[in-house]
Amino acid sequence: MHFEILRLMKLIQDEPIFTRPSPKKVQNRSWSPEWYKEWSKIWVPWRYSEETEQVRIYASPAMVRNALGFVMATSTEKQLILEQHHPELTSTHPIVVLSKMVSQLCVKHLDECRNVDAGYLQRGMLAMEMNIFTGGRMFEKLNRVNHSCAPNMIYFGMKGSWKYKALTAIKAGEELSHSYLGHELLLPTERRKQLLFRSKCFECCCKRCLNPEEPLRDVPCSRCFMEQAANYGHEESWLLQSLLNLLPSDSSQPFENNEEELYGGVRSYPNISLRDLPLLPPVCHRDMHDA
């Protein structure tokens, strides 16, 4: 997505066009034994590559929330949802196959879905699955920004306020990007690509994924960083330091020293350094960083 903007641009704000039903609204329903029996059989095998072990992928309850949210949406909301990018129904991707099975189950057993075409319902479910934000929200403008593992914007939402904030100076005509990942953004390239393909149905080819050098490889794990910060008086948070390593060295847009705002309140960070991953176990953090 491109905008005619200057580097002084700081925010893109938007309002939700749709909010998915909360988990409680699904959990509090009465489900028939027939539903449970058929639901337990919904899974597909998946192997990301020849090197990875084949695993089973099961349907998520969020897909049922997608189905119920879509059928209960207004006509205008349905149209806006279906305008969002989603994979073709003919795709053999596990998420598409699972969504087909779940849509057929919903049409068969849920009163709200009985008179809805299963293919039409599946499209709505996939559009939500690919584009939903934290809190189950979808947006008209924010949803159109592409992913990058080295984003130049970051999303954060608070009650009544949903926006992107620039992480660095952005030139006119430069593509805007944010990360579809949460704290997984700090994982190694192959793992990030695997997660994105599994959840968003695309192979990431951003500049970071194509770069043989990992910019976060010199960032210590959160535990060791805290020890170093205590010894040397560093004020930056571990997450802040990690994100700074993703930005160009000439970035002129300063971060606010507030990790909760920067990362939308996510505080579940990896406990190991990227350098540790190929060597664990039994190498401990301190041995690794003292080497």
Image (cartoon, rainbow, N blue to C red):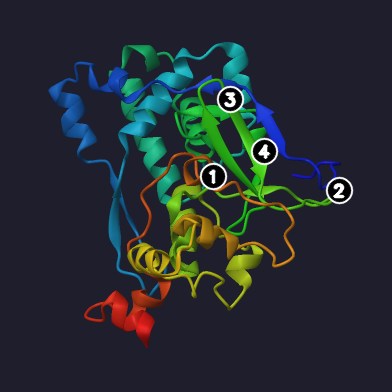
Pick whichever of labels 3 and 2 is earlier in the sequence.
3
What amino acid does circle 3 point to?
A: Ser
Disc 3 versus disc 2: distance between alpha carbons? 25 Å
> How many angstroms separate mark 1 from mark 2 (CA)?
23 Å
Residue at image mark 4 = 144
The residue at which mark 2 appears reads as 172
Which mark is nearer the camera, 4 or 2? 2
Report the residue marked by disc 1. Answer: 262
Nearest to N terminus: mark 4 or mark 3: 4
Q: CA distance from mark 3 to mark 1?
A: 14 Å
SS at badge 4: helix
Q: Which residue is mark 3?
A: 161
Mark closest to the chain's N terminus, 4 or 2: 4
Tell me whether circle 4 and circle 3 mark residues in contact (CB < 8 Å).
no
Name the element at disc 2.
loop
At numbered mark 1, what does the secondary structure look like: helix, strand or loop? helix
